[in-house]
Image (tube, grey):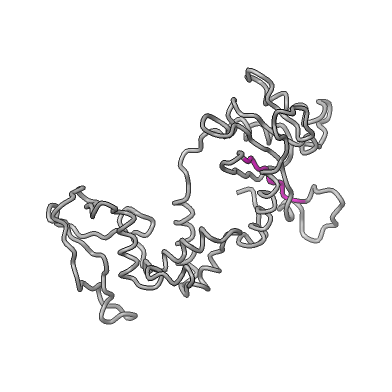
């Protein structure tokens, strides 16, 4: 039996029952006035007739509050609100989006769920927005592992490099992706114009806690800065400003008390490349 054989993935009434158990674990609550009692279920109510559905569509899960006299469903206040997509297809889309390791495109949802591309795009963007964690706290702070791995990878052809132009052995024509990986925590990736102090330092200072230990591979910022020495040395100096103790570590390993390696960053880099090939269709821009 498949996971997708569950009733709430195929039956609209079962989908509303499932959503109500998640949204209202202790019973229905009116989203308009907050009442907990005198809430009634309305059965057999149908939507307005249309060309597609001359008899209308039955409104499952519809309830009415006895205090404010307003109607509502468990969709209100969720990403499923104000949508014509059936709830059971919303749940299928959420399951596919969360269980696909390499991500899933809106076109793929459109083909699988048999809905329009516009509806699939709308659903996928709403679901991704719902996955946001809100304000981003600095990585490596209190309550975390305290270790942040930083490195870069290159992918595809940058917009600044015209098509058909001869490519050299270097990676100057590719997009540079900077990733910050917190051990046993979150990942943040940024498209940067180059591996320079001006590009890297603001990102690190905005996203990494002062208490964090930073692991980086020295050769990652390998581009020399004319008249100012190696960029990696300058970045190390900038990061250590204001810190109580030096916390810049090298993956080449001079501190034996830590497992100094980029073991958390490398699979993320591979994932980003597969992700871009899969549902970003090899298109990476500054935006």
Give the tally of numbered discs.
0
Residue at screen point 85% across, 57% down = 166
- Specify the principal SS of the magenta part: strand
Q: Is residue 176 magenta?
A: yes
- Indicate the quadrant where residue 162 lies: bottom right
Instruction: Give the percent coordinates (x, y) of residue 17.
Output: 30, 64
The region drawn magenta spans 174-181
In the picture, measured across the screen, residue 223 lies left or right of residue 97, that is right
Q: Position of residue 245 (x, y in %)?
A: 66, 19
Is 130 magenta? The answer is no
Residue 67 relative to residue 278: left or right: left
User: Which image quarter: residue 281?
Assistant: bottom right
The residue lying toward the viewer, choosing from 254 and 173, is 254
Q: Residue at x 59, y 58 (%)?
A: 101
Q: Position of residue 237 (x, y in %)?
A: 72, 23
Q: Residue at x 71, y 41 (%)?
A: 262
265 w.r.t. 143: above or below: below
- For the point 20% across and 73% down, the residue is 44
Q: Nearer the viewer, residue 127 or 160?
A: 127
| 21 over 189 or under it: above or below | below
Q: In x, y percent, where is residue 52?
A: 34, 80
In-image side of 127 versus 180 (left or right): left
In the displayed structure, would residue 248 be above or below residue 149?
above
């Amino acid at each position: 039996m498949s996971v997708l054989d569950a009733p709430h993935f195929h039956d609209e009434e079962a989908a509303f029952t499932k959503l109500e158990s998640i949204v209202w674990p202790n019973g229905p609550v009116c989203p308009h006035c907050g009442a907990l009692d005198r809430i009634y279920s309305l059965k057999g109510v149908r939507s307005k007739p249309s060309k597609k559905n001359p008899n209308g569509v039955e409104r499952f899960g519809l309830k009415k509050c006895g205090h404010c006299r307003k109607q509502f469903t468990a969709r209100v206040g969720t990403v499923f609100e104000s949508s014509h997509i059936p709830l059971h297809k919303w749940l299928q889309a959420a399951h596919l989006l969360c269980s696909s390791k390499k991500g899933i495109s809106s076109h793929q949802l459109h083909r699988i769920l048999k809905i329009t591309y516009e509806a699939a795009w709308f659903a996928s963007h709403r679901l991704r927005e719902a996955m946001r964690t809100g304000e981003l706290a600095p990585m490596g702070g209190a309550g975390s592992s305290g270790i942040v791995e930083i490195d870069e990878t290159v992918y595809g052809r940058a917009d600044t490099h015209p098509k058909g132009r001869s490519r050299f052995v270097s990676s100057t024509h590719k997009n540079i992706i900077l990733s910050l990986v917190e051990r046993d925590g979150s990942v943040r990736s940024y498209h940067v114009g180059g591996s320079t102090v001006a590009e890297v330092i603001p990102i690190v200072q905005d996203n990494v806690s002062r208490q964090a230990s930073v692991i980086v591979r020295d050769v990652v910022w390998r581009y020399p800065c004319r008249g100012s020495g190696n960029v990696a040395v300058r970045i190390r100096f900038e990061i250590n400003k204001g810190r109580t103790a030096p916390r810049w570590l090298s993956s080449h390993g001079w501190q034996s008390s830590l497992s100094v390696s980029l073991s958390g960053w490398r699979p993320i880099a591979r994932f980003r490349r597969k992700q871009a090939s899969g549902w970003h269709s090899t298109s990476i821009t500054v935006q």
